Amino acid sequence: MRRTLIRSATVITMDDAIGDLATGDVLVEGSRIIDVRPSIDVAADTEVVDGAGRIVIPGLINAHMHTWQTGLRGFAANWTLLEYFRRMHAGLATVFRPDDIHIATLVGALNQINHGVTTLVDWCHNNPTPDHTDAAVRGLIESGIRAAFFHGSPKPEPKPGEPHFSEVPHPRREVERLLAGPLADRDGLVTLGLAILGPHYSTLDVAMHDFRLARELKLIASMHQGGGPAKTPGGWEKLIEAGLVGAGVNVVHGNDLPDNLLDRMVDLGMSFSVTPENEMIQGHGFPITGRLLERGVRPTIGVDLESVLAGDLLSAARVALSMQRALDNAEARKTHGTIPATTTIPVREALRWLTMEGARMLGREHHIGSLTPGKLADLVIVNASDLNLHPVHDPVATVVMQTSLANIESVMIGGAWKKRSGRLLVDDLETKKELLARSGRRLVQDIERQGRAA
């Protein structure tokens, strides 16, 4: 069985029982980590990677991204949330072909690996046909990333005689098809979840149906919460009364959740995914990072939309951390007339959002999220000798506050290298980039053509 030893690196395990190693070794056998210690002796046939001047961290977990929009990078950068609903979901999304979904998902996932993400929650809500869905799943599988494919539903404006999307239950037959086919292995590299409408965007009957479907099939139910008035006021209370809310239910955004409802959600064991940069750009409101921390729970972090901003998860974490520190500092000035005596959120907390909390949200905390012997070998090597990182005084601060794409030297997923020495290990990358560019150009041309015809 293949063995790899990363030797003499700074190791940030995110495992409280092991702690961090100023100088340590990480031994991988097959797909799993089998040892993490200051010094490990290995057989002669073991691949040895020199970790001197490097920081090894667990693979990052991007908890929320609409990867199907990769071919439209930057196109929506100046849109508010209301413009996004109108111009993306009711506009551009309607002219996507399966090939567009495939190349966007493939290249988007490769870009995540390039940034040190080893697990991607792909929230795919532009799949009007099974062919679109299969194209997205195929893109994830081809990329080699670990992924949770959250199967969603499109949100176009209804044509005459068609129901509004809020009145359409999640398609059981399609979910069962995926579970019987490409996503049958619940411990596989790509697994299934449900990206449902939730009570904010659906009728109560649809919400009840979708929550019950997720519970019956033992799938995570994730939903957006926010962005205008709720379709079903009081819907959450009715779902709670029906016993359908608890662990395995994930809220994305949640900026306008009232305190009493947030209290109940936390008590019931729900998870929360914050996409801080996009929430502030598009008008969702301030991220709920601090409100969660006050209640003893942590957020997960997502990039959200490459059609608006960069696909850099570490930057998203910095935004979440910086914004909440700013809010805390402002509140302290208002209440006490001075800033806090010490920071309210340490940098290690932000790294936990990107690792262990993402794993916990997916129910995979025993498999990924830390460099713990027995877990899957998903890890990232950061070149801390680079000009922008050297010298390192606090390795966690270096990773969270200063590391960029340029410093992500190597990425391993399930014991297999996906990036080495700063280079993605993928064939025909330039061809894939050109296919993505062609797709993006055609999508924009098609929607413009439709606009002229109307």
Image (spheres, helix red, strand yellow):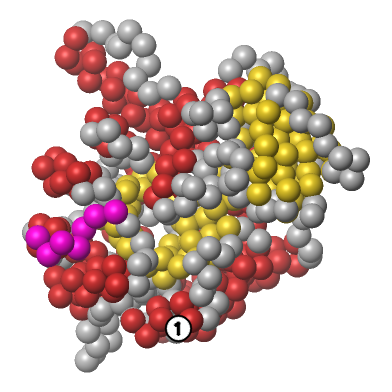
- Magenta part of the chain: 241-247
Rendered residue at 16%/42% (across/down): 263
Tell me the crowding category of disc 1: few under 14, some 14 to 19, or many 20 or more residues within 10 angstroms, Cα based: few
- Can residue 86 be seen in the rendering of this structure? no
Residue 390 at x, y = what percent?
70, 19
Q: Dominant secondary structure of the magenta stretch?
A: loop
Relative to 345, 118 lies left or right: right
Q: Is residue 244 magenta?
A: yes
In the displayed structure, does residue 207 sit left or right of residue 48? left
Q: Quadrant of the N terminus?
A: bottom right
Residue 74, placed above or below residue 87? above
* Residue 259 image point, x, y percent: 14, 40
Q: Is 280 located above or below residue 206 in the figure?
A: above
State which quadrant residue 38 falls in: top right
Position of residue 266 relative to residue 319, above or below, is below
Regarding mark 1 in the picture, which secondary structure is present there? helix
Residue 119 in view of the camera: yes
Residue at the (51%, 28%) spot, across then down: 17
Q: Amino acid at mark 1?
A: Arg
Q: Position of residue 311 (x, y in %)?
A: 54, 49
Q: Quadrant of the C terminus?
A: bottom left
Q: Nearer the viewer, residue 366 or 130?
A: 366
Q: Residue at x 24, y 68 (%)?
A: 211
Percent from the top left, x then y, of residue 428?
79, 65
Q: Is residue 72 magenta?
A: no
**Number of disc labels:** 1
Residue 188 drawn above or below residue 418: below
Q: Which residue is mark 1?
A: 177
> Would residue 383 be found to the left or right of residue 370 on screen?
right
